Amino acid sequence: MLPKIRFRDPQIEMAHGAGGKASRRLVEGLFAPLLFGSSTEPLGDAAFLSLNGTSIAITADSFVVKPLRFNGGSIGELAVNGTVNDLAVSGARAQALVVTYVLESGLPTEILEAEVRAMAGAAERAGVRIAGGDTKVVEHGKADRMYITTAGIGLPIPGVTLSAASVRAGDKVLLSGPIGDHGITILLARGELDLEADLCSDTRSVLPLVEALARVAAPGIRWMRDPTRGGVATSLNELARDSGLGVVLNEETIPIRDAVRGACELLGLDPLHIANEGQFLAIVAAEHAEAALQALIESPGGSGAKIIGEISQQPAGTVLGATSYGGTRVIDMLVGDPLPRIC
Amino acid sequence: MKFVDEFREPGVIGKAAEEIRRLADPAKHYRFMEVCGGHTHAIYRFGLKDLLPSNIELVHGPGCPVCVLPMGRIDDGLSMAQDPNVIFTAFGDMMRVPGTHGSPLEHKARGMDIRIVYSPTDALKLAQKNPDRHVMFFAIGFETTAPSTALILMRAKELGLSNFSVFCNHVTIIPAIRAILDSPDMRIHAFVGPGHVSTVIGCRPYEWIAKNEGKPIVISGFEPVDVLQSIVMILRQLKAGEAKVENQYTRVVPWEGSKAALRAMAEVFELRPYFEWRGMGFISQSALKIRDGYAQWDSEQRFQIPGVRVTDPKAAQCGEVLKGVLKPAQCKLFGKECTPEKPVGALMVSSEGSCAAYYSYEHRKASALTSIGAPV
């Protein structure tokens, strides 16, 4: 039987790569039916395969960030941490990466060298080996300086089994630290806004925090995700949809730095839609939640962790934000690229 | 965060909500129009409707510049961008507004040079950086954004910059309010007045609403405490049997407005005899045109513009929603053919459009709240 293609958009637009609804439509409507066959498993950050009786996690990610360097990091670091994190939040410890560079002819060697060094440093910090790769060069003007793709394999973290289907009403929503730092840093680094803020990308490997969580609460961890493009709102909407449950966030407990809030207020963006590169969300059974939170807070880089909400039976498939004064709102996935409002 | 947190303080919000419940006469049904799209957004974003008694109904007004722009003007703007020598610039809000053959964003994906700018100054700088290309700025907005467009036109003239022009779609708020009050199906008891527009025009231009129409109007800020306090002020007026213009947003809005901004507008713009508003038809003297002294920088005078007139899709009820006759969800297309991702009408595009705000924040909420046993 021919697979059913549901993707009907006539052309590819930026929104298809922004991580929100359009991206999901593309993956589920075109890629999944043609490439992943009849598998109906919700799509995660990494896939688990059983090879000769050994379970292995595999993932890949491409990096096209502009500018290449920004406060707190660069494309090379992102390329390592992004793939390590996709494995970590899938419950796997990265073992090895391979890397592909697509370079634009005319790229100064010193820029390439800086990024290769950045990758080496990030790989060493993350404890992962870079085992090989490939290089392609395209004509000048056909790529924006350089693109990097990394693919990684990992081995399961013992005792951790994750799925949206295992999430239950009453489970807690844990967030590892303040959100929006990366997305806003990049937006400001583009220099189009004439805004300045003392802000750094949060790019880092979250594996140490995931492992700290697993040590105290492994059986209670149901689901994890690193809220990159599309932000926390998009990740949690995916969870709500895949699990058929509701997510109720207490908006006042969500950690957001003032500089990020300020920029979002000015530009009319919602911090919950802004990308992160060094944070993760974990759904943890209520009885493990306090221990899990403590373990994060006591780990290096985890002091900003918070419980930001709870899973509820209803409203099914929906993320709801609640405030202490009694107002509530539906928090939707990101639509398109976040666009600033004008007045 | 300073200037924000104090206006979102739960204790103060609770007190204001309590005062509203105390002042509202349970035997009456109140319909207040928030004129400005920024207020609509804030009302949904902060769930303020949840705090109001059920007999206070908020009706969304016409104060969303993207939403009131007819599709023909978008087609006109995009027709200029067909010229490969032209760089089309606009605010981000404009990018997903559908024209007959797609939005600016879709035209960009097909290879047209269409760029988002965050301020008209950025468009001007782009023209300076690209002397071989013509930079066109698609200007939209009420009196809030018109002064900055006026200033860059003055600057362009000063510099003698020949490769820059403005496609002017600026509109003015007062005629729109008048059109709404003149509409026979309209029963509004009071207005939550525009905040940032009033920074420019001040509070006097609203006096006729109070004096001639007998409706209270309170110029309001955009934080939860601002909006609730404005409703308190309206209820106090109604209770006392008064109709006045009051200014809740005193930290930003001077009573007399901004003389400098008004001067810049008067230098560069004159009123158009009439202008088409989406869903509301032609409204006389409701929009701004670039004066002849600046003709060289007026896209409409420099380019051949088709002057497209496109009727809105029949099934879309943008006009009724825009005038507050229908709630967004009562439109036949709402949430089906028309979503923020694939908007049919402009109200679904801007985060300040009542349909988009309703869709993002309120849609599904009623059923969601019922399902968790909360009062709706």
Image (cartoon, coloured by chain):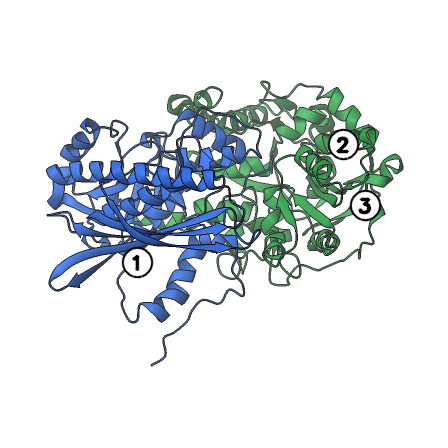
- Callout 3: few (<14), some (14-19), or many (20+) C-alpha neighbours within 10 Å? some
Image position, residue B268 (x, y; %): 82, 32
- Callout 2: few (<14), some (14-19), or many (20+) C-alpha neighbours within 10 Å? many
Discs 2/3, front = 2
Q: CA distance from mark 1 to mark 3?
A: 54 Å
Q: Chain A appears in which tint? A: blue
Can you tell which mark lies on residue A225?
Answer: none
Image position, residue B181 (x, y; %): 69, 40
> Number of callouts in the render?
3
Per the image, label 2 sits on a secondary structure element best described as: helix
- Disc 1 target residue: A43
- Disc 3 target residue: B274
Per the image, label 1 sits on a secondary structure element best described as: loop
Pointer 1 with pointer 3, Cβ within 8 A? no
Chain in green on the image: B
Query: Which quarter of the picture shows residue A341?
Result: top right
- Disc 2 target residue: B150
Residue positioned 72% across, 59% down in the render: B310
Residue positioned 73% across, 34% down in the render: B149
Query: Which quarter of the picture shows residue B295?
Result: top right
Query: Which quarter of the picture shows residue A330?
Result: top left
Instruction: Decide which of B142, B185 is in the foreground and name it.
Output: B142
The amino acid type found where label 3 is placed reads Tyr
Per the image, label 3 sits on a secondary structure element best described as: strand
Does any portion of residue A312 appear in the rendered image?
A: no
Instruction: Decide which of A15, B326 is in the foreground and name it.
Output: A15
Viewed as shown, does residue A340 lie left or right of A242? Answer: right
Q: CA distance from mark 2 to mark 3?
A: 20 Å
